[in-house]
Image (tube, rainbow, N blue to C red):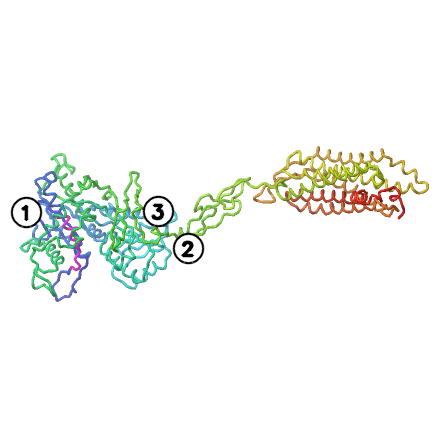
Amino acid sequence: MHKFGDVVLGGLFEVHYTSVFPKLTFISEPQQPICKGFDTLGFRHAMTMAFAVDEINKNSNLLPNLTLGYSLYDNCGALVIGFSGALSLASGQQEQFVLQENCSGSPPVLGIVGDHYSTFSIAIANVLGLYKMPIVSYFATCSCLSDRQRFPTVFRTIPSDAFQVRAMIQILKYFGWTWFGLLVSDDDYGLHVAQSFQSNLAGSDNSCLAYLEVLPWDNNPGELRRIVNLIKTSTARVVIVFAHEIHMIQLMEEVAKQNVTGRQWIASETWSTAVVLQTHELTPYLRGTLGIAIRRGEIPGLIDFLLKIRPNTNDTNGNDLVKQFWEYTFQCKFNPADRENKESVCTGDENMELAEREFLDVSNLRAEYNVYKAVYALAYALHDMMQCEPGKGPFSGHSCASLEAMEPWQLLHYLQKVNFSTQFGDQVSFDEKGDALPIYDVMNWLQLPDGKIKIQNVGEVKKSDSGDEELTVDEDKIFWNTDLKKPIRSVCSESCPPGTRMARERRQPECCFSCIPCSEGNISNKSNSLECFSCLEDFWSSPQRDHCIPKKTEFLSYQEPLGICLTTTSLLGTFFCAIVLGIFIYHRSTPIVRANNSELSFLLLVSLKLCFLCSLLFIGRPRLLTCQLRHAAFGISFVLCVSCILVKTMVVLAVFKASKPGGEANLKWFGAMQQRGTVLFLTCIQAAICIAWLVSSSPTPSKNKQYYNDKIVYECVVGSTVGFAVLLGYIGILAILSFFLAFLARNLPNNFNEAKFITFSMLIFCAVWVAFVPAYINSPGKYADAVEVFAILASSFGLLVALFGPKCYLILLKPERNTKKAIIGRS
């Protein structure tokens, strides 16, 4: 399709999407390939360029006194056809281009808009770049085209795939999708996307590909079945597809056959707004699709231009594209001989308003908007070139380009510096790589109540001032293809909560890991921690291992059940001693109280009360004073008690010997003063031992962290083990001596033989303290204190019951036996 002008711009569009090549033989003459499958939207792209050229020609402020022309070619979806058209544009082999007799004049075209595919653009740019021919692509997104060393003449009004990939990754991050599959087409577009995606994911946290598959360029049922089965069996719920519409049609037909549901499809700009996929059969699978789309724009006046399209049967410029569109739209033929079935003859007067709704719908102009900007970019560059003042030009010798002898490389210089704004308000300029300012719309496939699909804009992603991708999404507008109407989860492994660490699995992607709980004493206070950290010395991990807490402190407390029981027992023992003392005081004149020195009995009861009370020093948080007092009070109280028993035993033996002839002399050594003196002397020895112990190596409170990892045990360190052993040994010596003497006097001929009860009480006392030693050594922390308190209470109760129980029984229940005669009577 051609239009003459002072300067001609070329255009390459996909008006047909398939082509059939005839078989070549040595006999037959070469034949042109047959283009099939009329693409209405591709034709609208071409018409948009025609409209932009007409609009520029009507603009008195842009390229005044100069008429633009165009020459549009159909690539028929085939590289060889598109490449041939590009060469025709550059070389001027068509008849309508006439050079001057001296071969001077402008070249056939100064710049080309197109091509549609990245692969086609790469092939064309490799050749036309040699001639410095500016190429402004409206749809080729391959990031490889940004290579200025390889493609110095390529410009684009569509962002490159490098930005599209980064924008896609921003969407994945926004919705927390870290596990996804990637499908790409088998061409430069798809393969460069795959490479870019993998390189960008390398710097992404915990995001990785479950699979990467290349869709076959031609329909390959076996390969498609394998790929769709992989999608079906994979745990990844998000599928990203960078492919063309024809590949998506083939893929989704197989998806429908295998009934693969529950997948979130992410569309690249090539098919995110494709109407051809919005069929009744594919809607259940593709509804809710999110995608990246070319920036939508508005082109005032385009609809009126489209409605005025008419075929000119007398056109000699070869503008057969309009005729083909007319025949496709109204199902008619201009040549009656070409009619098939019931096709009518085209008149050229058919009503354009009856054309396809998709063709006349200009509410969602995207690729057309890029075509529009590409034409204007070339026009503004040409305008700037025409404004050059002689002597001030940018070329060697400060020359300017002239209308009579323009060169493409001259336009290339001005195209690099072009900067203008469209009527829609978008700024158009090119960076050093020839890329336009990147911006994409985020699209969502909304299913309407009638079952149809409406593609709605739910956000945008653009390059921010800092150079990063800035994503804006209106989540309330998004339609999700899930029962809960919420985004699906697509992760290989769920996030590791605080208290655990990530453990990578060998030969697995980075986002596949196990969550290992932190060991005791270690924590992680954030999700997806790679390691656990140790708590400080006096802290321990919480049960959830997500923060450090002060270690529990352990000691024999008054508030715990064990401490309460021991305290209660100690107070009961003290109370019983007070009762017995009260009974003895009340009945102090009775023979059983007066017998064997009642003063020693009273002193023994007081010492037992002290034994019971000293056990309270072992309960509660250890402090310096209680640590120093507990063993001293315990040692002195028990020595006082055992000394009284020893003296009582000795008195019993002395009285028995005095009853024999010549034995009265023994009693002078056991008078009241001697008894008091003996008890005091024996007790002072223990006091001296305690003083020496406290002075040399005093017991002190200590925080013991050896017993438990999560507890601090407060205990009293004895200081000098020798001192503690001497203290206990001295008590043991007195107890054994008392037991030995009482055992000798066990068969004294008295009705109330107190020596028997002393023997029994000492037997209990010694048994308790012999058992105490190994139990104390093997009990950690507060249990060592509990064992010692138990030994104190058990031995004290043993002495109280064995020595005073029988006497209280006689005093209270058998008063008739509480007589002197009964006590000294023979059995």
Q: For this rendering, which residue is in front, 8 or 280?
A: 280
Q: Which residue is mark 3?
A: 173
Q: Secondary structure at mark 1?
A: loop
Location of residue 700 by image quarter: top right
The image shows residue 671 at horizontal and vertical percentages of 87, 35
Q: Are marks 3 and 2 in contact (CB under 8 Å)?
A: no
First along the sequence among labels 1 and 3: 1
First along the sequence among labels 3 and 2: 3
Q: For this rendering, which residue is in front, 251 or 69?
A: 251
The crowd level at tag 3 (other Cα within 10 Å; few <14, some 14-19, many 20+) is: some
Q: Which residue is mark 2?
A: 507
First along the sequence among labels 1 and 2: 1
The image shows residue 472 at horizontal and vertical percentages of 30, 43
Q: Which residue is mark 1?
A: 100
| Res 803 visible | no
Q: Are marks 1 and 3 in contact (CB under 8 Å)?
A: no
The crowd level at tag 2 (other Cα within 10 Å; few <14, some 14-19, many 20+) is: few
Query: Which region of the structure is painted magenta?
Result: 35-50
- Disc ID at residue 383: none
Q: Amino acid at mark 1?
A: Gln
Q: Residue furthest bottom?
A: 27
Q: Amino acid at mark 3?
A: Lys
Q: Amino acid at mark 2?
A: Arg
